């Protein structure tokens, strides 16, 4: 019986046609495609057409480009084939620089950064009730290059801050440095981290001929971090450490293309670097503290970027 089902499945699937995967997925459909580069010829007599590389794209009567097609700048064009004449008909065209700078503002999805030496609370509502506020934000710049249809490679530098209020002056804390015991903090306590991430990455964008374009991405790079335990007024240091951690991150979001102005990016960035460090005589109680898995900023982050 199993053999009969297997043979039937093979016959069924062998009779079906599947498009081959191609990074330029619009071009897997014989009726659509893309062309990128400089306009080599712009013909305005007889049949209106432009030549980009080896692609001749015909311009339908009434089609108005958002810029002068005599431009010497790089362009990105989309076309569909006329089923009767087999001509490539221009449907959309944009000016496209090879390099695109962007500014990014990061809104971390607030959560406790694991772990630190002064709290054993593993529940955010409980933390908010017993401790204090968490503030975190980030910003940075990005330069991306168009290397293939839908594929961008980029270099990015981001700066992140994270601050956790733990105890006001005179309050007690739960300290892992003395195996879960409590100690009094006459000057109060905050846990602060600062991280600079320098990463290389790549993105693939879908539906590039539309105004809303989903994308996925992957990055990898160095995270230079600084961890501090400070007093409530942040004038006294109980302990501090710094280091560098290599780490990847995953991205997913959408581009909103605004013709003639630029592109707004809205996306999630996941995974954060892990800090390992040792602090001698942390909190001045004669006990050393070692940490091997402290995140230096929240794992989940929502980013808003403007690409020029």
Image (tube, rainbow, N blue to C red):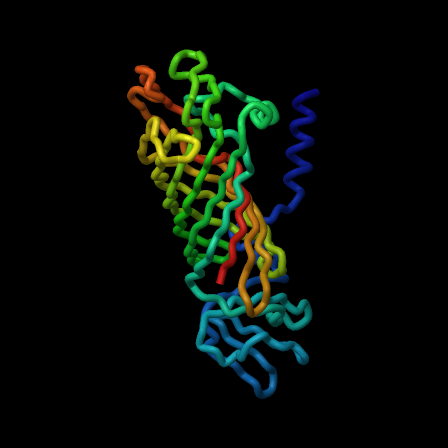
Instruction: State the count of labels.
Output: 0
- Residue 21: tell me if it is visible: no
Q: Is residue 224 above or below residue 78?
A: above
Q: Is residue 251 above or below residue 55?
A: above
Residue 104 in the image, given as x and y percentages of width and height: 48, 52
Write the residue at 50% across / 59% down. 307
Write the residue at 65% across / 27% down. 6
Query: In which quarter of the view is residue 131 placed?
Result: top right
Write the residue at 50% across / 58% down. 149
Question: Along the horizontal axis of the image, is 14 left or right of 143?
Answer: right
Question: Along the horizontal axis of the image, is 237 left or right of 213?
Answer: left
Residue 274 in the image, given as x and y percentages of width and height: 40, 30
Q: Is residue 245 above or below residue 303?
A: above
Observer-nearest of 28 and 16: 28
Observer-nearest of 126 and 236: 236
Residue lying at the far bottom in this picture: please name it: 45
Write the residue at 37% across / 41% down. 221
- Residue 70: tell me if it is visible: yes
Query: In which quarter of the view is residue 229 placed?
Result: top left
Residue 180 in the image, given as x and y percentages of width and height: 45, 12
Observer-nearest of 280 and 224: 280
Observer-nearest of 79 and 147: 147
Residue 15 in the image, given as x and y percentages of width and height: 67, 42
For the N terminus, the quadrant is top right
Residue lying at the far left in this picture: please name it: 280
Question: Along the horizontal axis of the image, is 82 left or right of 24?
Answer: right
């Amino acid at each position: 019986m199993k053999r009969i089902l297997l043979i039937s499945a093979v016959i069924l699937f062998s009779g079906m046609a599947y498009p081959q995967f191609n990074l330029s997925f619009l071009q897997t459909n014989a009726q659509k495609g893309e062309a990128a580069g400089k306009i080599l010829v712009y013909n305005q007599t007889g049949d209106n057409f432009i030549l980009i590389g080896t692609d001749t794209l015909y311009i339908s009567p009434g089609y108005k480009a958002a810029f002068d097609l005599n431009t010497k700048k790089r362009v990105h064009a989309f076309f569909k084939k006329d089923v009767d004449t087999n001509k490539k008909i221009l449907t959309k065209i944009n000016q496209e620089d090879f390099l695109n700078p962007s500014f990014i503002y990061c809104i971390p999805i607030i959560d406790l950064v694991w772990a630190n030496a002064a709290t054993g609370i593993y529940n955010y509502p409980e933390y908010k009730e017993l401790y204090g506020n968490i503030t975190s934000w980030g910003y940075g710049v990005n330069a991306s290059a168009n290397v293939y249809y839908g594929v961008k490679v980029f270099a990015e530098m981001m700066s992140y801050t994270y601050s956790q209020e733990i105890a006001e002056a005179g309050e007690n804390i739960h300290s892992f440095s003395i195996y879960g015991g409590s100690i009094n903090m006459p000057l109060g306590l905050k846990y602060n981290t600062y991280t600079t991430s320098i990463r290389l990455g790549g993105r693939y964008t879908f539906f590039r001929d539309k105004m809303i374009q989903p994308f996925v991405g992957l990055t990898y790079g160095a995270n230079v971090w600084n961890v501090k335990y400070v007093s409530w007024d942040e004038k006294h240091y109980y302990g501090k450490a710094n280091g560098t951690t290599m780490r990847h991150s995953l991205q997913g979001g959408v581009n909103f293309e605004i013709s003639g102005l630029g592109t707004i990016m809205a996306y999630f960035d996941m995974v954060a670097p892990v800090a390992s460090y040792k602090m001698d005589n942390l909190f001045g109680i004669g006990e050393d503290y070692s940490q091997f898995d402290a995140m230096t900023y929240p794992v989940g982050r929502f980013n808003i970027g403007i690409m020029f």
